[in-house]
């Protein structure tokens, strides 16, 4: 049976009809046309589909759409609403983008980590990003970019 | 004509679960228990979904009814009093990670949190889900087994408190009845020690264990007064290593001693070959893991002697 979900998406209230067996990524990409969130492994292992629910990074490929009723969802489109984020800028400056498919996940993680104001060592940064896989294996430049973004915000890294 | 089933890779590749089910969102435990009682075997409860949704995607599980527990208040807590530490079933791994009680009083469980999944998975996945999913590789199991934890399960008919050692019956099989919900993990403070640790070996950082081990020790005048050892991924369920425990109680707390008896582990475990590792490798690496966990536990008690 179809259900109506109401939730805050990137700062605005939205309403949608969903089936119980529909995953959040389907609602975001196919119904609400926010195609920034990428679908890759489909089983929670790669992090490309990471979105924030109530401020915390989770995986939209294994979250039911019905489950976001009443919650706040932020996608990669939401975090970069006011222009490029510090992490996005740094990723470009460091040449950290190869095929680019994993990056929306990294960008969402970057916003979360910056907001949490985690003071991070490189090791902690790599730990925090261990659920985000880059199959082009561009990790060195991605980590460099994250460090740069943290430093720009005046945080130690 | 037999049904045509898509190959697993295509199943993964779906943004809609390939099965239909009725969905329920109870807002109280009573309401959830009522539903479970009525719907029985055909229903499954949903917590973080990190095991269940993946299994439904792969059609390994096809429940007709899905009962989401996450709208039930008061199942997410970590409390400590003079007698016990109690953890609500819906407590996420991130909640465990942030808890000073877990960090300071249950160091083996804290080690397991740090070794579990990714930040995203820890935000979603719950402790109750890890236990009820009953994977032999469940990372919470070896620490909870060495702390002699019990689980509280509730149904319309009443409450049962089950020692974790009796809860796991086989891969994915537990003592939980189809109308029961696990609500709480209880750890008696007499069974915990700062001298405890968990170690895990896996293929990559975000993966289930090839093998894992937890150790809890209590010392008296340099003698091992109490020893609990548990392992993951080396038997059909997470297991206690009772033969090795029995041999070590009363012995001096020295790594040389531990080393002498490690072969006893072979009596306690029944590893198999699978995608993550071979039975032979698991048997050998178990000894190393137990040794390492011992070292870590001894160090937490203020230093080890070789
Ligand atoms: C990418 C990835 C990495 C992972 N890494 C690890 C890892 O390193 N270590 C590890 O141990 N696990 C790992 N897992 C497995 C999983 O995340 C954990 O087992 C998790 O704790 C399951 O909790 P959940 O809340 O998501 O459970 P769910 O998927 O919601 O439920 C799991 C099962 O338990 C039942 N259940 C849940 N809660 C209750 C309850 N309160 N009462 C009765 N039944 C209940 C459900 O019906 C279902 O059968 C990983 C999973 C993924 C996808």
Image (cartoon, coloured by chain):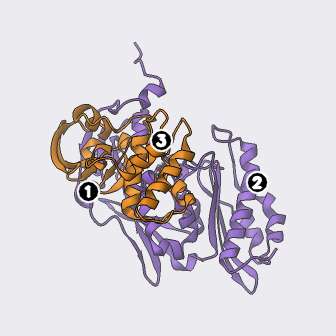
Chain colours: A orange, B purple
For the N terminus of chain B, give its image quadrant: top left
Closer to the camera in the image, A43 or A31: A31
Q: Secondary structure at mark 3?
A: loop
Q: Is mark 3 within 8 Å of ligand 1?
A: no
Q: Secondary structure at mark 2?
A: helix
Q: Are marks 2 and 1 on the same chain?
A: yes
Circles 2 and 3: CB atoms closer than 8 Å: no
Q: Residue at x 79, y 68 (%)?
A: B258
Chain under disc 1: B
Left or right of B176 on screen, residue B265: right
Picture coordinates of residue B114 (x, y %)?
54, 60
Q: Which mark is residue B71?
A: 1
Disc 3 residue crowd, few under 14, some 14–19, many 20+, Cα 10 Å? many
C-alpha distance separating marks 2 and 1: 45 Å
Q: Which mark is residue B61?
A: none
For the C terminus of chain B, give its image quadrant: bottom right
Disc 2 residue crowd, few under 14, some 14–19, many 20+, Cα 10 Å? some
Residue B227 appearing in the image:
no
Q: Are marks 1 and 3 on the same chain?
A: no
Picture coordinates of residue B149 (x, y %)?
52, 68
Q: Where B99 falls versus A70 (above or below)?
A: below
Q: Where A12 falls versus B153 (above or below)?
A: above
Picture coordinates of residue A135 (x, y %)?
53, 36
Q: Which residue in the structure is indicated by mark 2?
A: B266
Q: Residue at x 53, y 76 (%)?
A: B104
Circles 2 and 1: CB atoms closer than 8 Å: no
Q: Which residue in the structure is indicated by mark 3?
A: A46
Q: Quadrant of residue B287?
A: bottom right
Closer to the camera in the image, B95 or B141: B95
Between marks 2 and 3 in the image, the one whose residue lies nearer the viewer? 3
Residue B121 appearing in the image:
yes
């Amino acid at each position: 049976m179809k259900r109506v979900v109401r939730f805050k998406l990137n700062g605005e209230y939205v309403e949608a009809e969903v089936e119980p067996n529909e995953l959040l990524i389907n609602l975001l990409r196919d119904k609400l046309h926010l195609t920034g969130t990428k679908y890759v492994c489909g089983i929670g292992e790669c992090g490309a589909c990471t979105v924030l629910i109530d401020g915390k990074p989770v995986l939209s490929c294994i979250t039911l759409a019905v489950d976001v009723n009443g919650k706040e969802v932020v996608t990669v489109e939401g975090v970069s609403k006011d222009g490029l984020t510090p992490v996005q800028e740094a990723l470009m400056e460091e040449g950290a983008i190869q095929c680019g498919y994993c990056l929306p996940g990294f960008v969402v993680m970057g916003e979360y980590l910056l907001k949490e104001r985690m003071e991070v060592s490189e090791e902690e940064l790599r730990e925090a990003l261990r659920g985000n896989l880059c199959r082009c294996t561009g990790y060195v430049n991605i980590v460099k970019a994250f460090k740069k973004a943290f430093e720009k915000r005046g945080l130690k890294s | 004509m037999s049904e045509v089933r898509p190959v697993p890779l295509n199943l993964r590749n779906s943004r809609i679960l390939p099965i239909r089910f009725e969905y329920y969102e109870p807002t109280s435990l009573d309401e959830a228990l009522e539903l479970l009682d009525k719907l029985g075997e055909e229903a499954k409860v949903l917590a973080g979904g990190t095991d269940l949704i993946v299994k439904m995607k792969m059609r390994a599980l096809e429940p007709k009814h899905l009962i989401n527990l996450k709208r039930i208040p008061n199942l997410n807590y970590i409390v400590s009093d003079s007698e016990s530490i109690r953890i609500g079933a819906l407590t996420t791994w991130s909640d465990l990670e942030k808890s000073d009680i877990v960090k300071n009083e249950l160091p083996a469980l804290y080690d397991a949190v740090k070794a579990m999944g990714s930040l995203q998975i820890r935000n979603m996945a719950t402790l109750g889900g890890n236990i009820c999913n009953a994977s032999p590789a469940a990372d919470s199991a070896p620490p909870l087994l060495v702390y002699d934890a019990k689980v509280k399960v509730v149904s319309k008919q009443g409450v049962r408190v089950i020692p974790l050692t009796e809860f796991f019956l086989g891969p994915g099989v537990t003592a939980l009845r189809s109308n029961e919900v696990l609500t709480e993990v209880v750890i008696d403070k007499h069974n915990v020690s700062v001298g405890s640790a968990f170690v895990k070996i896996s293929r990559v950082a975000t993966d289930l264990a090839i093998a894992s081990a937890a150790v809890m020790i209590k010392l008296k005048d340099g003698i091992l007064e109490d020893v609990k050892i548990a392992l993951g991924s080396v038997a059909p369920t997470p297991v206690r290593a009772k033969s090795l425990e029995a041999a070590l109680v009363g012995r001096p707390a020295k790594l040389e001693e531990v080393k002498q008896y490690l072969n006893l582990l072979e009596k306690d475990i029944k590893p198999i070959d699978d995608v993550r590792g071979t039975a032979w490798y698991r048997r050998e690496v178990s000894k190393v893991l137990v040794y390492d966990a011992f070292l870590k536990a001894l160090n937490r008690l203020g230093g080890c002697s070789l």
